[in-house]
Image: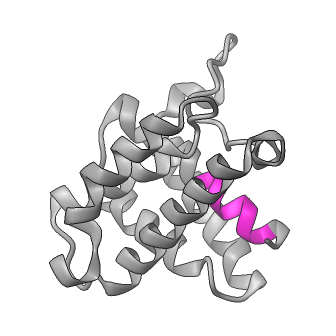
Amino acid sequence: MSSERNAVISALIGLAGACGNSGTTKESDRVLLLGLKSLSGAKKEQRRVIDEIHKIRDSIAPGCTVCQVPCGNTADYDLSKLDAQPEKMREMKSSMLELAGRAAVSAETPSGSFCTALYELIQGLTEDEDISALQEIMEEVRPVLEPENI
């Protein structure tokens, strides 16, 4: 994976964390889809998208940017943690990203439940220990996100 692609994914995880705390908006839904669609795009576009994701994340959770005791919930996720995880966890997370990307590309006018499922899937990438939690997330969101169901 390119460093820009990793940075988009990391920023999307931070956005999902911010939205989990403060709620989603039409703008957060828009940049979520934009970010996922950019994963297969050019590096220059990915850098632009990262800036946009950060801008929206910071508008949703403005206190987090100046917090004296940051919890890390809205921070960009450190994807290097994946390297230390068991192969099955890495494979499951790769499947989660593939599903999110396919769904984002297939969605023309996504519903609220569609975006909620995407946020849940992206936030699930932070699960570092319990593969059964990832399997549960996939089982829950797959019916909403599979292209034939959109």
Q: Is residue 91 left or right of residue 43?
A: left
Q: Position of residue 47 (x, y in %)?
A: 73, 72
Vertical placement of residue 40 versus 48, above or below = below
Q: Residue at x 30, y 46 (%)?
A: 24
Q: Is residue 117 above or below residue 127?
A: below
- In the rendered structure, the answer to whether residue 98 lies left or right of residue 118 reads right
Image quarter of residue 73: top right
Residue 118 position in % (x across, y down): 36, 58
The answer to whether residue 35 is above or below residue 116 is: below
Q: Nearer the viewer, residue 117 or 22?
A: 117
Name the foreground residue: 107 vs 94: 94
Q: Which quadrant of the rendered structure holds the C terminus?
A: bottom left
Q: Position of residue 76 (x, y in %)?
A: 67, 44
| Helix, strand or loop for the magenta stretch, by majority | helix
Residue 150 shows in the view: no
Q: Which span of residues is magenta-colored?
A: 4-11
